[in-house]
Image (cartoon, rainbow, N blue to C red):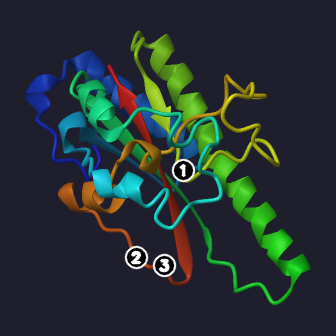
């Protein structure tokens, strides 16, 4: 088990424990710098997180896997209560310098897009392994907005990557900082030199 876990092991069978080890190994092999097992009840949901999607208004508001097109925090709390455990995972990259020009800004944007999809691809692999292990309700949530397309078709459109696009934790109200603190981990905020991008896999 991960050092970041405050799990209640009586919830887990020996098979669960073995499968969790496989999932965390898969995450690391796929490029995650950290993979932590936690109880699902340790995931912190706060309505104020979703508030920040539109105060100030995020340019991705209205994307197909962003508010208002995803479950509300209250709806997510109901779903979360049905899960036993989760895997938190992160990727890491250097915090880019402030762009000095429009060209530099585009380069930074492209790098952020790549890092976002890197995390999403790891989550998709973990979902697939979870399903193979019999966890038919496994569901992944990435960090930040979806970046598979240069521009989302937005509300009312048809997603071009429906089997890959995943909502973010923040979109459904997950407090990433609060969740990490609850399991004795930390997240530097605001960031300085290194940026960690966190994702969440719910498993049951």
List the residue tagged with mark 3.
191
Residue 196 image point, x, y percent: 51, 64
Query: Circle 2 is placed at which residue position?
Result: 189
Closer to us: 31 or 172: 172
Q: Specify few, some or many for label 1: CA neighbours under 10 Å numbering under 14, 14-19, or 20 or more.
A: many
Camera-side mark, 3 or 1: 3
- Front-most of residues 35 and 62: 62
Compared with 83, 39 (above or below) is below
Q: Residues within 10 Å of mark 3 (few under 14, many from 20)?
A: few
How far across and how far down the image is residue 170, in percent? 43, 50
Q: Nearer the viewer, residue 188 or 59?
A: 59
Residue at image coords 68%, 56%: 115
- C-alpha gap between disc 3 and disc 1: 18 Å
Give the Cα distance between marks 2 and 3. 5 Å
Q: Are marks 3 and 1 in contact (CB under 8 Å)?
A: no
121 vs 172, left or right, is: right
In front of the other: label 2 or label 1?
2
Where's the C terminus, which quadrant?
A: top left
The reply to whether discs 2 and 3 touch (Cβ–Cβ < 8 Å) is yes
- Rendered image: mark on residue 32: 1
Q: CA distance from mark 2 to mark 1?
A: 20 Å
Instruction: Give x and y (percent) for residue 91.
Output: 55, 56
What residue is shown at x 74% (from left), y 54% (from top)? 114
Q: Residue at x 77, y 84 (%)?
A: 99
Q: For the residue labelled by badge 2, is the local secondary structure a helix, a strand or a loop? A: loop
- Upstream in sequence: badge 2 or badge 1: 1
Left or right side of 101 for 202: left
SS at mark 3 in the image: loop
Tell me what residue is drawn at x 53 percent, y 34 percent: 69
């Amino acid at each position: 088990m991960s050092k970041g876990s405050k799990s209640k092991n009586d919830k887990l069978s020996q098979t669960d424990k073995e499968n969790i080890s496989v999932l965390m190994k898969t995450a690391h092999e796929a490029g995650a710098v950290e993979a932590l097992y936690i109880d699902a009840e340790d995931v912190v949901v706060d309505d104020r997180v979703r508030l920040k999607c539109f105060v100030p208004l995020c340019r991705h508001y209205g994307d197909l896997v962003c508010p208002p097109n995803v479950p509300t925090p209250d709806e997510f709390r109901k779903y979360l209560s049905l899960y036993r455990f989760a895997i938190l995972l992160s990727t890491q990259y250097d915090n880019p310098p402030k762009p000095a020009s429009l060209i530099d800004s585009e380069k930074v944007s492209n790098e952020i897009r790549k890092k976002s999809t890197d995390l999403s691809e790891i989550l998709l692999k973990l979902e697939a392994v979870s399903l193979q292990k019999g966890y038919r309700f496994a569901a992944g949530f990435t960090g930040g907005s979806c970046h598979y397309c240069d521009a989302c078709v937005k509300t009312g459109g048809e997603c071009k990557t429906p089997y890959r696009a995943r909502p973010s934790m923040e979109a459904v109200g997950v407090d990433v900082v609060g969740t990490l603190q609850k399991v004795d981990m930390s997240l530097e905020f605001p960031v300085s030199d290194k940026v960690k991008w966190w994702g969440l896999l719910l498993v049951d």
